[in-house]
Amino acid sequence: MSIAIILNGISRKKKFFYKTILPALQKEHSINVFETQYAGHATGLAKAAANKFEVIISAGGDGTLNQVLNGVLSIEQNLPVLGLIPLGSGNDFAGAVGLTPRPEQMLLLLKQYKPQPTDVGFIKCHDSANKEKQHYFINVCSMGMGPATVMQMEKAPSWMGTNLRYLTSIIKTFFQHKPELVELKTQTWNWRGTVRVLAVANGKSFGNKIYLAPEAKQDDGLFDLFVAANVPLFRFLWFLQTLKRARKINDARIYYNTTDKIEITSEQPVAIEAEGELVGFLPATIRMKPGAVAFLR
């Protein structure tokens, strides 16, 4: 079995990977490690590896996995099996499917080798020049406070480190972001209003265990939708504590739904993010691709 690991080169757990995880895996398998050198590098590494390896394992957080996914799906056929060693700060998708950084778990998954069909979301949207753009995601994409936080992080100095940049960015977003007017359509639901957060989820949580979709499954062919309308700021902060406990919110301004396709429009330049990466802007169509990848989980 040919195995490639694509490692986030700036992961704070890189030493743990080389000291503990990799030696354990190398006792039973021949492993090729490709370490990212710059932002977005994992996509290119995954695309180059996709035709050469039977298994590609992402070693990093949700962002690294998102890049690996897009690199692998760019070849469209004879896809390798995907795996994940969660080394990020949030690891939301890993939490949804029960993965840990323990090498014993990955060794067992490789020994049993029963990759599971896993759903993937597919976004068609537009870039800042209004050109059509396409992007895959496996966990959550969102509009509202999510991309606003991503844009704040892009402005923050790199010396602050990921965790501090995220913390300061989300604080700024809470107090600066204004709810945005959107219109969404599914096969069974039309809705128009201002949103603090609109999330389209395949996984259960985003933003480091904020459970917008605690009942989501990764193989049912459906997105779980979460809409937080124009909720007063401090009420929304209160709601976040409920979401952190993986509980649904019972409030007239919070909406839950399911669909395999959603169309979202706005008269404003509303941004879209997926796994902490700015993807593009509305209008967008987001479709589910059932069982698009085989995943070790």
Image (tube, rainbow, N blue to C red):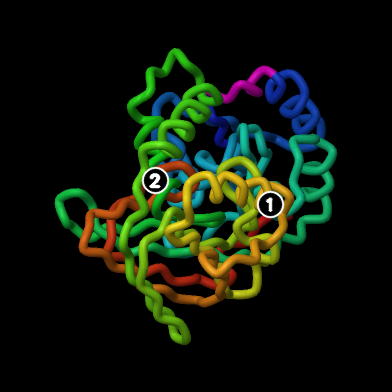
Question: How far apart are labels 2 and 1 at the CA level?
Answer: 22 Å
Q: Is residue 213 above or below residue 17?
A: below
Which mark, by number, is residue 54?
Answer: none
Mark found first going from the N terminus, 2 or 1: 2
Give the structural element (helix, strand or loop) at label 1: helix
Q: Main secondary structure of the magenta part?
A: loop
Residue 272 in sight here: yes
Identity, as a three-letter code, of the amino acid under mark 2: Pro
Residue bounds of the magenta highlight: 10-15
Residue under label 1, please give it: 242
Q: Is residue 217 above or below residue 188?
A: above
Q: Nearer the viewer, residue 257 or 100?
A: 257
Which residue is at a point 69% across and 25% down the rendered structure image?
A: 17
Which residue is at a point 61% across and 58% down the rendered structure image?
A: 203
Is 12 magenta? The answer is yes
Residue under label 2, please give it: 147
